[in-house]
């Protein structure tokens, strides 16, 4: 099975590069050089992605996020401000998961079920519905844990640890996504096998 570009070594390095450059440049020269270095790095990565025509949409989003982080850091005059925009990701993910559970439409089912080719009426399948609900709860817990750690590190002014956590969360979210899809595919297969056995 082909490794998604975003989870390949090159993809991981490209995603982490702006943050790592910001941390190093901030440590060496201060906030202003760090902001400039981050912007240049994001632009170079975007140009490379456009030239190779690989994950162009992700590259654009990444460049915009890096620019937003640099802008917030410059606007606040604090290096830790760089990590305010990324906090929105786990916050929005947790909110989406919790709201989907309240609406009795688990987010994992709405997304993963379509990706793995599950039954359109998956909510009427008790096993699948329970599986997607549990998966959504787990994703919400990971999101809340990530958000709590980032908020605490931000309040403590731990810029280096914020950067490390930000870099690590990229592969973590990639692994969570991949695992969710694999388990969803198995759950759908089990449900189909059970339905076929009951019908025979």
Image (cartoon, rainbow, N blue to C red):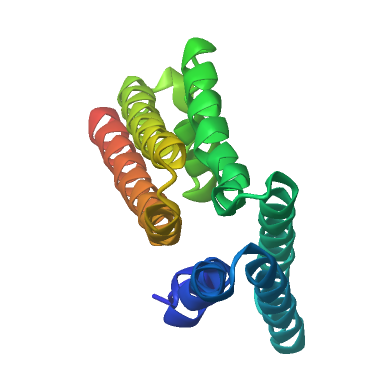
The residue nearer to you, when weighing 183 against 13, is 13
Residue 52 sits above or below residue 174 on the image: below
Residue drawn 55% across the image and 68% down it: 26
Residue 130 appears at what percent x and percent y? 32, 23
Residue 134, by quadrant, is: top left
Residue 16 appears at what percent x and percent y? 50, 69
View extreme (front): residue: 29
For the N terminus, the image quarter is bottom left
How many numbered circles does the render carry? Answer: 0
Image-based side of 17 in relation to 161, left or right: right
Residue 85, by quadrant, is: top right
The residue nearer to you, when weighing 47 against 19, is 19
Residue drawn 68% across the image and 56% down it: 65
Can you see residue 20? yes
The residue nearer to you, when weighing 157 against 37, is 157
Image-based side of 4 in relation to 129, left or right: right
Residue 64, by quadrant, is: bottom right
Residue drawn 45% across the image and 54% down it: 159
For the C terminus, the image quarter is top left
Can you see residue 120? no
The residue nearer to you, when weighing 136 against 105, is 136
Residue 176 appears at what percent x and percent y? 36, 50
Residue 53 appears at what percent x and percent y? 72, 82
Residue 154 sits above or below residue 18 on the image: above
């Amino acid at each position: 099975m082909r490794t998604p570009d975003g989870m390949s070594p090159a993809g991981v390095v490209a995603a982490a590069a702006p943050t790592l450059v910001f941390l190093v440049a901030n440590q060496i020269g201060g906030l202003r050089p760090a902001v400039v270095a981050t912007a240049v790095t994001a632009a170079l990565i975007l140009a490379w992605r456009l030239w190779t025509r690989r994950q162009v949409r992700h590259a654009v989003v990444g460049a915009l996020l890096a620019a937003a982080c640099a802008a917030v850091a410059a606007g606040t005059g604090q290096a830790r401000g760089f990590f305010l925009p990324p906090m929105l990701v786990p916050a929005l993910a947790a909110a989406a998961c919790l709201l989907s559970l309240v609406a009795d439409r688990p987010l994992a089912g709405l997304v993963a079920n379509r990706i793995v080719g599950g039954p359109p009426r998956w909510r009427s399948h008790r096993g699948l519905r329970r599986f997607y609900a549990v998966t959504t709860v787990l994703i919400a817990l990971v999101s809340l844990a990530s958000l709590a750690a980032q908020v605490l590190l931000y309040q403590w002014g731990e810029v280096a640890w914020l950067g490390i956590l930000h870099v690590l969360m990229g592969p973590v979210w990639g692994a969570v996504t991949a695992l969710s899809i694999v388990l969803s595919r198995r759950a759908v297969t089990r449900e189909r096998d059970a339905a076929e056995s009951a019908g025979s």
